[in-house]
């Protein structure tokens, strides 16, 4: 069905006075000029023609105004031009009338919120009093309003909504309104992560700090003259101070990694050398704890991958540290590589307590720790989060497999690189 003419086309300028009237006026003026005897009646007729012209012009303007009104109140409005502008918007947008009935929904609107019948009240789809109140307010005042709208199902989403009156020529008050939804889901999520992070970090630092203050009070008071208690308390205080400094180191590490999210595409690192450094660093603790440290797959020559040597040492160093800390009951630890034609998998395996399956998906969250029932806090809960972030930069991810009572394997798969391949492909014409 064809749309009615758009209001701005209805007001397109046409000759304000009809052509025969102009011709008549020119004729009369010529007669008055050339024939002196006929001048008075010719001038009289000219004045009459001018009057008719003015009346015609007024009538046309009023017709145009009425045309706009009819057009705007037509059930077919918005017209094709308005629809195409609203449809071109990348965010959900709806045209509403003064009764808050839906007149048009753009494609993104339908895709995001589902199909709504034209003419239905918008409140049938958006059951949010605040949103409807903002729309009503815009209609009442004729001014733009801004509000927020959120949905919990099927997933949590949040929008900033602008309600914008659509001014039209010839209409004193806006007849139509554009409700424009701008997606704020990601922004809200990041805000929540940031506030959670600050709350968690402060909590983690406050616990050892409170314990330090407590011991200082005791040492100044009741334990002042008790050398045995003093030595014991000082040991605990040293532990807490170390814990705080470890936390701060991990937090700094995490923020440094998050700032450098991109890795140079042509940076090559030998995973064999990475895993050897990790094993060297782990050896003293392994010996201290009487754990056998087994290296596997490191003797087959270099395994080049796209990556940063120091960051990969940090990744596998963290995994080895965890294996020594949480997997020591198994008596041995494996650090190694498994190759296929095109890939290499680097892994750290222990044969200790393992991890209950419900915790595995959450291990890389910041500050996430599995309670071991002893009530002792052993780590910062940031190690695996650092690992995860470094691996995102390396275009890969951490796989965790664990069987409670039998141990855990933390592994990362990389694509093998050929030295010089990148440079060659760069200059290939
Ligand atoms: P943390 O500093 O606490 O070690 P991580 O992020 O490195 O932080 O590890 C998160 C949690 O995962 C640890 O607190 C521990 O409960 C669990 N975990 C990590 N590695 C192992 C492992 N090899 N065996 C058993 N549990 C582990």
Image (spheres, helix red, strand yellow):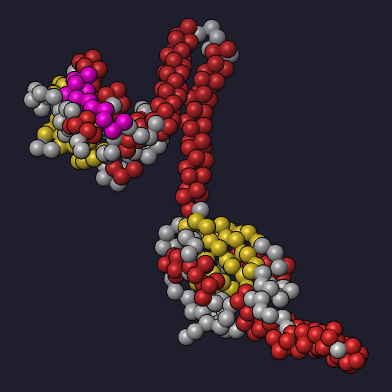
The one of 286 and 315 positioned closer to us in this rendering? 315
Q: Position of residue 232 (x, y in %)?
A: 43, 13
Whether the magenta-drawn stretch holds residue 266 is answered as yes
The one of 43 and 216 positioned closer to us in this rendering? 43
Whether the magenta-drawn stretch holds residue 106 is answered as no
Q: Position of residue 290 (x, y in %)?
A: 19, 18
Instruction: Please indicate whether residue 260 sits to the left or right of residue 403 in the image.
Output: right
| As drawn, 53 above or below 363 | below
Give the total number of marks visible in the rendering.
0
Q: Position of residue 429 (x, y in %)?
A: 20, 38
The answer to whether residue 349 shows anywhere in this view is: no
Name the residue rendered at 69%, 86% in the picture: 19
The one of 263 and 137 positioned closer to us in this rendering? 263
Q: Write the start and end of the magenta stretch as one range.
A: 264-277
User: Which image quadrant for residue 69?
Assistant: bottom right
Name the residue rendered at 42%, 23% in the picture: 249
| As drawn, 134 above or below 260 | below
The answer to whether residue 423 shows anywhere in this view is: yes
Q: Position of residue 320 (x, y in %)?
A: 25, 26
Name the residue rendered at 52%, 82% in the picture: 3
State ligand 1's quadrant. top left
User: Which image quadrant for residue 102?
Assistant: bottom right
Name the residue rendered at 55%, 63% in the picture: 180
């Amino acid at each position: 069905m064809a749309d009615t003419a758009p209001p701005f086309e209805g007001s397109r300028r046409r000759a304000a006075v009809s052509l025969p009237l102009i011709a008549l006026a020119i004729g009369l003026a010529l007669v008055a000029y050339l024939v002196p005897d006929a001048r008075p009646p010719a001038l009289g007729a000219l004045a009459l023609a001018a009057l008719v012209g003015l009346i015609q012009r007024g009538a046309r303007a009023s017709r145009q105004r009425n045309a706009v009104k009819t057009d705007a109140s037509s059930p077919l409005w918005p017209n094709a031009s308005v629809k195409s502008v609203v449809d071109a918007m990348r965010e959900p947008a709806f045209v509403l009338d003064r009764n808050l009935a839906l007149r048009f929904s753009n494609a993104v609107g339908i895709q995001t919120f589902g199909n709504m019948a034209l003419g239905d009240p918008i409140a049938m789809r958006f059951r949010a009093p605040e949103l409807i109140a903002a729309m009503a307010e815009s209609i009442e005042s004729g001014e733009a309003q801004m509000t927020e709208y959120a949905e919990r199902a099927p997933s949590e989403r949040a929008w900033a909504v602008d309600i914008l009156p659509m001014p039209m020529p010839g209409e004193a008050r806006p007849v139509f309104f554009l409700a424009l939804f701008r997606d704020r889901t990601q922004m809200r999520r990041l805000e929540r992560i940031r506030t959670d992070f600050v709350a968690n970090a402060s909590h983690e630092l406050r616990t050892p700090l409170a314990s330090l203050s407590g011991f200082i009070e005791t040492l100044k008071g009741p334990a002042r003259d008790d050398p045995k208690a003093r030595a014991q308390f000082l040991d605990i205080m040293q532990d807490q101070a170390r814990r705080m400094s470890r936390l701060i180191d991990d937090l700094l590490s995490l923020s440094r990694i998050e700032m450098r999210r991109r890795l140079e595409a042509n940076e090559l690192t030998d995973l064999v050398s990475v895993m050897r450094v990790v094993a060297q660093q782990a050896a003293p603790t392994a010996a201290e704890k009487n754990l056998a440290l087994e290296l596997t797959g490191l003797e087959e020559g270099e395994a080049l991958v796209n990556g940063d040597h120091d960051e990969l040492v940090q990744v596998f160093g963290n995994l080895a540290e965890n294996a020594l800390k949480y997997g020591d009951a198994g008596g041995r630890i494996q650090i190694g590589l498994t190759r296929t034609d095109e890939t290499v998998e680097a892994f750290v395996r222990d044969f200790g307590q393992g991890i209950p399956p419900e915790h595995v998906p959450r291990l890389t969250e910041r500050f996430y720790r599995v309670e071991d029932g002893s009530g002792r806090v052993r780590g910062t809960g940031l190690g695996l989060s650092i690992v995860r972030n470094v691996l995102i930069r390396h275009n890969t991810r951490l796989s965790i497999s664990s069987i409670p009572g039998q141990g855990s394997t933390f592994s990362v798969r990389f694509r093998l690189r050929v030295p010089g391949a990148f440079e060659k492909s760069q200059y290939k014409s």
